[in-house]
Image (cartoon, rainbow, N blue to C red):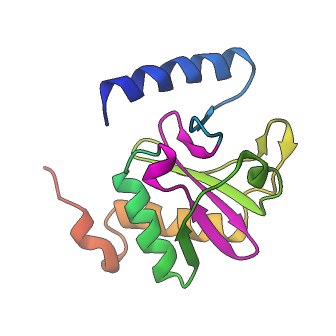
Amino acid sequence: KTVGNYVNSSLAKVEALKAGYDEAIMLSPSGLVAECTGENIFCVRNGIILTPPLSAGALEGITQSSVTTIARDLGYDIRVDNIARSDLYIADEIFVCGTAAEVGSVNSVDERKIPCPGPMTKAIAATYAKAVRGQDDRYKQWCELVK
């Protein structure tokens, strides 16, 4: 992830906090959802999980890749596709993921309430938490024991 992206993200995060929000959603120049300031974003609608493509300005994330794998392993339909800001307003669930954040639910966007945490978010978050702690044999290769 480049220095330039971190500068923009840092400024957006400060603005969000000053406005009383926990996080900022970054948009592409064309207004599509790209990511949050330090996390990738996922939107669930009608049983389908969407995450923005790199072409929308999202930075490729290791945690995003892990969450995508987990979602597929749990039998969920997950797709990389453009997400409009208005899509977030009618989402059934929204969650974010990142190395520090792990998997967390989003409870509102622009003061519009989002049901949270939803069943898909709960299942993915629980599986991810076990995976990164070496408690799920399917993902043991993701962990390195440090003494």
Q: Is residue 51 magenta?
A: yes
Residue 84 percent across, percent down from the top left: 70, 50
User: Where does the image place residue 48, in percent across and percent down from the top left?
Assistant: 66, 74
Q: Is residue 39 left or right of residue 18?
A: left
Q: At 77% from the left edge and 59% from the top edge, which residue is drawn?
A: 91
Span shown in magenta: 32-57
State the residue lying farthest toward the right. Answer: 112
Please give the name of the residue rendered at 58% of the width and 17% of the height, measured from the top-left corner. Answer: 14
Quarter holding the N terminus?
Answer: top left
- The picture places residue 83, in percent across and down from the top left corner, at 65, 55
Vertical order, 16 against 112 (above or below): above
9 lies above or below 116? above
Q: Name the image quarter holding residue 82.
A: bottom right
The residue that appears at 39% across and 55% down in the rendered structure is: 63
Instruction: Identify the residue at horizontal 46%, vertical 50% (top origin).
Output: 55
Horizontal relation, residue 54 to residue 121: left or right? left
